[in-house]
Amino acid sequence: MKIVFIGNSIINGFPYDREQDFVGLYRKASGQEVLNKGVNGDTVQGVTSRFAQDVLAQRPDMVVILLGTNEFIYQESLPETCMKQIAYLAELAAAHGIQPVLLTPLPVDPLMAESRWMVCDDVDYELVQEQIEQLRKQMVDYGKQHEIKVLDTYRAYQEYADQIGAQAAYYDGIHPTREGHQFLAEIVGKLL
């Protein structure tokens, strides 16, 4: 099986080397042919513009899509608009015989993100978190309605962070620690 993971810096593994991110860890554990097409700071518009090259041209069996956080940090999109664009990508993949799998965006820790990530007055991380939650619900509903696999990584990571604490789960309030990437690799491995 050939799988493309596409999306933002969580896919890319920021701030770690690619082999230390959950995609690289999943590749090692599964033995599958896995391509990492994550780009730091990317949004659904960026992924849409490179989808033909990074996904369709690769002819994978499956594409795993993770988007949603940057759209709200950069105030580029509302949850409904973001969901429509993600649905478009899922349907485009399916039309080309590629199984789409959606990962819900990870929750953010607003206090940590305010102090460690993009410290600026115009980003309301509480609002970002609310919008991520809204998108998560829309993705889960979309998956049920259209029989598309949605892995609720939001809920799994929230429970993980609640158990071990935000300082151990987050590098900067947005990106997972190395241990967080290991957790995601295990969850994705079980759910895929």
Image (cartoon, helix red, strand yellow):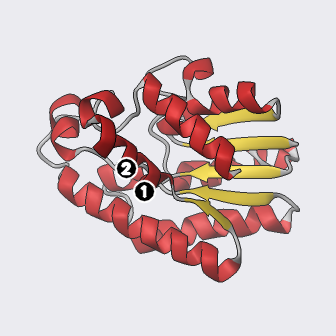
Q: Label 1 crowding class (10 Å Cα cut-off): few <14, some 14-19, many 20+?
A: some
Residue at the image point whose x is 35% and y is 50% from the top: 107
Q: Position of residue 93 (x, y in %)?
A: 77, 61
Query: Toward the viewer: 115 or 26?
Result: 26
Q: Is residue 117 visible?
A: no
Residue at the image point whose x is 62% and y is 72% from the top: 143
Q: What kind of residue is marked 2? A: Glu
Residue at the image point whose x is 76% and y is 47% from the top: 55
Seen in the picture, residue 123 relative to 119 is either above or below; the reply is: below
Q: Secondary structure at mark 1?
A: helix
Q: Check whether the beta carbons of the residues at disc 1 and disc 2 lie within 8 A of each other.
A: yes
- Residue 159 numbered mark, or none: 2
Could you tell whether 124 is left or right of 59 in the image?
Answer: left
Query: Toward the viewer: 19 or 120?
Result: 19
- Residue 145 numbered mark, or none: none
Q: How many marks?
A: 2
Q: Which residue is mark 1?
A: 155
Q: Position of residue 49 (x, y in %)?
A: 64, 51
Q: What kind of residue is marked 1? A: Arg
